[in-house]
Image: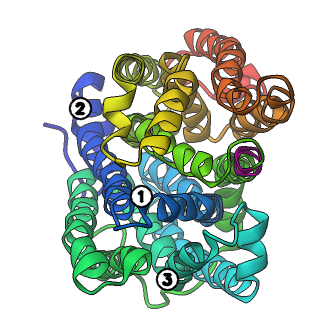
Amino acid sequence: MAATISGAPTELGTRSIGTLLKQYAIPGIIAMTATSLYNMVDSIYIGHIKDVGALALSAVGVCSPIMNLGVALGTLVGVGASTIMSVLLGQKNYANARKVLSNEITLNLILGVLFTAVILIWEEPILYFFGASERTMPFAKAYLTWIMIGNVISHLYFGLNSLIRATGSPKTAMGLTLFTVLFNAALDPVFIFALGLGVKGAAMATVISQFLALCFTLRYFSDKNRVVHFGNRILEIDWKIAKNSLAIGLGPFLMNSAACIVNLFINQQLRRYGGDLAIGAYGIVARVSFFFLMIVMGFNQGMQPIAGYNYGARQYSRVRRVYLLTAAWATGVCVLGFILCEAFPRTVVGIFTNHEDLLQISAKGLRIINLTFFLVGMQMVSTNFFQCLGMVRKSIFLSLTRQLLFLVPLVYLLPLRLGIEGVWYSFPISDAVSFVITGILILNLMQKFRKLGDGDDPAILGSAI
């Protein structure tokens, strides 16, 4: 077995790629699947609130793009930090790896506080802008207020959780995620039904569970025996590391910001052509798709430290192998999702609601949106792969193509002729076009890696690598 230096995962450069990917991806998959179930459980409970479940689901759907924007700010810091951490550990630069940890804390605190303040100050106008109606506003405001109160906690927890994975402890990261899911699932029925707090109770349960997980995470990085731990000054910024971290995180930030913008446009179009129930239906469809996409993200989490470490160590044949294996496994997951959504749409959406009108709209939307879902796995892995290697421009470009360049125009144009079905059909069309573009870029990169020998300077191939 390869030696491990107090938290520095040197095995990433020596063990079998397949073994490593299982070792790192399985905890990530379990954690991300648990996270998707976490959101699904919330929605299931909310959807079954007596008399107002359908409207409450629609209200949470209105809040989704705002929450996506918060996630975007978190990934701006967290993804770049974990990527740099993996590369620095591959280079055995432990001093700078510890600086990354302090940067993560400081930047997340700054961005989290600013975002929370902006949302809470202008909460009602923002919610109306994102698709709330007079009927859904009370539920949306009750839910979003508590989510924003815990926003800084979420930023810090998810950012530090990604650093735990990058330092070679994927099982610890998984365990923390499972804790938040199980604790939230236990609190939900108590807060929502027993205490009669409704959607506010669901948000409060989320904040409490993440706060407890954050406490353990801070304790984890306080252990001085770990290579990566808090120094004498937890809150400080190394501007060079911060700049590189934010540059790498810009791709996923733009991707999540684009998701926020797209969700805004979708909500507006759904409300125009289908009303509040259409927004609720999209919320259900998104959570079903999200379940499978989170599994793919688990594979991406497993790939990230392996690809980053070996790229830093200039072992390009291993970098190439980990991409190909991750892309194959992710595609298999999306094929399974495609089959289930096309064959049993009503059964799937029936988990969330027994409201007949909402069931019909959701089942139809699920089938149409996922017509090309089997293509999405490779696209997600490829975008993440460019990000893992610090290829910022390509990652940003792929992040934007599907959502802003293709999906937004289609969401506006197709409903002019097809009504609400035009919104649904926008998704498979944009996925298919984006798949082609992603394939061209990744094939070009794979060809370049074939020309590199292990140990070569990647600069010999120019700025493309």
Distance from Cα at disc 2 to Cα at disc 3: 37 Å
Closer-to-camera residue (46/369): 46
Stretch in magenta: 265-271
Query: Mark 1 against mark 3, which lies toward the viewer?
Result: 3
Badge 2: residue crowd in 10 Å (few <14, some 14–19, many ≥20): some
Task: Tell whether label 3 touches label 1 (CB within 8 Å).
Answer: no
* Relative image position of residue 84 (x, y in whole percent): 54, 53
Residue 24, by quadrant, is: top left
- Quarter of the image where one finds residue 439: top right
Name the residue tied to disc 1.
Answer: 162
Q: Which residue is nearer to you in this view: 411 or 337?
A: 411
Dominant secondary structure (helix, strand or loop) of the stretch shown in magenta: helix
For the point 84% across and 23% down, the residue is 417
Going from N to C along the chain, the mark reached first, 1 or 3, is 3
Mark 1 Cα within 10 Å, few/some/many (few <14, many 20+)?
many
Residue at position x 68%, y 60% in the image:
246
266 falls in the magenta region: yes
Q: Amino acid at mark 1?
A: Ser
Q: Nearer the viewer, residue 280 or 285?
A: 280
Tag in front: 2 or 3:
3
First in sequence, mark 2 or 3: give its number.
2
Percent from the top left, x then y, of residue 223? Answer: 25, 79
Q: Which mark is residue 146?
A: 3
Q: Which residue is mark 2?
A: 22
| Quarter of the figure with the C terminus | top right
Tell whether label 1 touches label 2 (CB within 8 Å): no
